[in-house]
Image: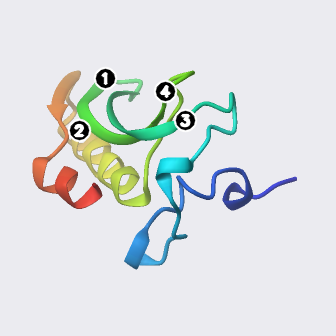
Amino acid sequence: MKSLKELFPPLLFAGGDKGGVACDKSTATCPLCGGRIAPGSTTVTVDLKSGLLIVRDVPAEVCRMCGEEWFIEDVSRTLEELTAETRAKGAQMEVLSYPKRKAAAAS
């Protein structure tokens, strides 16, 4: 069985100076369809069972052919924090924009 680093080296572990694997994203190809992967953004929906969280404008690496999306570690961590905050509030539905200061750091 291949590790995540073997399957997705240029994406999931693209942490730069934060210990990730250095890569040239301009030549990254999708492991699912072979399409070109480029920086973009997406909307993430999280079903909390007791409610729903929607986060818009989330920075991601997106396959231009099949639309598959990947997040760097900092973005995943921020999404986990937003999910925990929404769960703690007990909100039935919350729609947020990805924090601008976090988006700038993730780019």
Q: Secondary structure at mark 3?
A: loop
Indicate the amino acid at tag 1.
Gly
Indicate the amino acid at tag 3.
Arg
Q: Secondary structure at mark 1?
A: loop
Q: Which residue is mark 1?
A: 51
Q: Is 6 left, or right, of 30 in this rendering?
A: right
Q: Mark number for residue 86?
A: 2
Q: Is 43 left, or right, of 14 in this rendering?
A: left
Mark before the other along the chain sequence, 3 or 2: 3
**What residue is rendered at 34% in x and 52% in y?**
75
Q: Position of residue 44 (x, y in %)?
A: 35, 29
- Quadrant of residue 56 within the rendered picture: top left
Q: Mark number for residue 36?
A: 3
Cα gap from disc 3 to disc 1, whole angstroms? 35 Å
Q: Nearer the viewer, residue 23 or 56?
A: 23
Q: Nearer the viewer, residue 104 or 97?
A: 104
Q: Which residue is mark 4?
A: 64
Q: Nearer the viewer, residue 2 or 96?
A: 2
**What residue is rendered at 35% in x and 59% in y?**
74
Q: Position of residue 89 (x, y in %)?
A: 18, 38
